[in-house]
Image: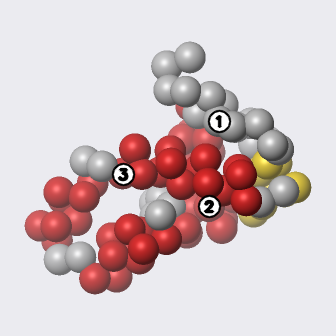
C-alpha cells in the first residue's frame, strides 16, 4: 500500500489521481488490514491520515469507525483482530 499512496500523493497527474480515487476505499481497507497485522498498541491517527492520504483526521476517524476500528482519542488502538468486513 505504501507504493500506491506514494504514487497517489506525489507523482500522479490530476487525471490519474481522479482514476485512482475510485480505488481508494479498497486499497485503504487492504492497507488498514496490513497495519492491524503489523502494528501493535496505539498508532497516532495523524500517522494513518498521512499514510492513507486522507484529507484530515475526521475523515480518517469516519473511515475507521465504518470499518470496525474504534478511535476515541488521537491514537488508534490496534489489536490482533482483523477489521470487520464492510457492511457488517
Cα separation between marks 1 and 2? 15 Å
Of callouts 3 and 1, which one flags the residue occurring earlier in the amino acid sequence? 3
Q: Nearer the viewer, mark 3 or mark 1?
A: 1
Q: Secondary structure at mark 2?
A: helix
Within 10 Å of disc 2 (Cα), the crowding (few <14, some 14-19, many 20+) is many
Of all residues shown, which one is farthest toward the left? 15
Of all residues shown, which one is farthest toward the top? 88
Determine whether 79 is above or below 47 in the image. Answer: above
Q: Secondary structure at mark 1?
A: loop
Within 10 Å of disc 3 (Cα), the crowding (few <14, some 14-19, many 20+) is some
The residue pinned by badge 3 equals 24
Q: Position of residue 9 (x, y in %)?
A: 37, 75
Determine whether 74 is above or below 82 in the image. Answer: below
Name the image quarter holding residue 49.
Answer: bottom right
Q: Nearer the viewer, mark 1 or mark 2?
A: 1
Cα separation between marks 3 and 2? 14 Å
Cα separation between marks 3 and 1? 17 Å
The residue pinned by badge 1 equals 83
Within 10 Å of disc 1 (Cα), the crowding (few <14, some 14-19, many 20+) is many
Of callouts 1 and 2, which one flags the residue occurring earlier in the amino acid sequence? 2
Amino acid at each position: 500500500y505504501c507504493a500506491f499512496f506514494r504514487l497517489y500523493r506525489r507523482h500522479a497527474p490530476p487525471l490519474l489521481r481522479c482514476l485512482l480515487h475510485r480505488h481508494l476505499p479498497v486499497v485503504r481497507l487492504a492497507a488498514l488490514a496490513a497495519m492491524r497485522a503489523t502494528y501493535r498498541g496505539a498508532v497516532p491517527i495523524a500517522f494513518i491520515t498521512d499514510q492513507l492520504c486522507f484529507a484530515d483526521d475526521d475523515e480518517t476517524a469516519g473511515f475507521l469507525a465504518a470499518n470496525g476500528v474504534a478511535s476515541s482519542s488521537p491514537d488508534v488502538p490496534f489489536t490482533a483482530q482483523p477489521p470487520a468486513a464492510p457492511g457488517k
